[in-house]
Amino acid sequence: MDGIFSGLEKLGLGNIGGGDLFEDPKKKEEAVKKEEPTKKLNLAKEEDFLFEKKYKCPVCDGSFEAKTVRTGKVRMKSVDIDLRPNYDEVDQSKYDVIACPDCGYAALGRYFNTINKYQVDDIRVKICMNYKRLDYVGDTYTYEHARNLYQLALANAVVKKAKNSEKAYICLKTAWVIRGETQRLDQAEPDFAKKKATNDAQEKELLANALNGFIMARQSEEFPIAGMDATTLDYLIAALAVETEKYDIASKMVSELLTSRTANSRIKDKARLLKDMIAEKTGSAG
Ligand SMILES: [Zn+2]
């Protein structure tokens, strides 16, 4: 928790994030290191794939513009096992949080307008009153800025008592942002190894939190959960369990998917890939 929330002080919100992120009392295991392939990507003009979209803030009623990726203009190159899309042109995950620069209200795009009046009241008292204005100039978001926005979104989610799935989704997407940054680190830089190790540990902690949050959401929320049907969520839980080396959970979810009558062949194929990865990691015959 400290890792996820460290740095909130600079936004004036150092008092948020002391307790457990999710509502379930279950304790999470600490993160374990894992090696990720590293490569340097050359981004050709990320700003060409962005535009300023207008938003009206449901908390302070102000209007503002935020950078948004032009959908349809970027081409997906590949998808990571935890469903993170890879694009050459732009790291789309950096732009998924919408944040009001005036009052500090922030949420993932899909949740930005779904907020009730009690949540607005809580955010006004616990976020807006303490929030230090986050001014940003630049044609594209730096990873540091994107991380600040995600942290702000997570603080808002805690204050408005968001569902476990929303908090888990923020953790997942923050992990994706960190992975995007790691992929773009310059291996020639002297502090490359240190920065990569720090990022990998942070990413793993966030993935572990996402896994726990989605497991709790699966037990208590109605589908669709964070836009996912049951099969997709089960697959994601299996993938997150593989990434965080919770192979018992991963194996259980994978066998459920492979024997499921509702899972389609595409998701079963993906589950088979996970099964191979589990077999490789655990040394079992699969
Ligand atoms: Zn606002």
Image (cartoon, rainbow, N blue to C red):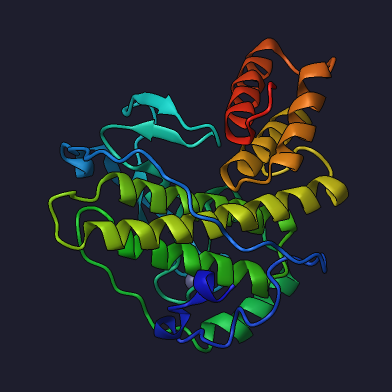
- State the residue at coordinates (62%, 55%): 208
Residue 63 picture location, percent across and down: 42, 64
- State the residue at coordinates (29%, 61%): 195
Q: Is residue 86 above or below residue 244?
A: above
Residue 64 picture location, percent across and down: 39, 63
Q: Is residue 206 above or below residue 243?
A: below
What residue occupies the far top of the structure in this picture?
265
**Residue 240 is drawn in which quadrant?**
top right
Toward the viewer: 211 or 116? 211
- State the residue at coordinates (57%, 72%): 155
The quarter in which the C terminus is drawn is top right
| Residue 6 horizontal side relative to residue 158, left or right | left
| Residue 235 horizontal side relative to residue 7, left or right | right
Q: Is residue 197 above or below residue 20?
A: above
Q: Is residue 254 visible?
A: yes
Q: Is residue 155 above or below residue 228?
A: below
**Residue 166 is drawn in which quadrant?**
bottom right
| Residue 223 horizontal side relative to residue 15, left or right | right
| Residue 179 horizontal side relative to residue 22, left or right | left
Residue 146 picture location, percent across and down: 37, 59
Q: Is residue 95 visible?
A: no
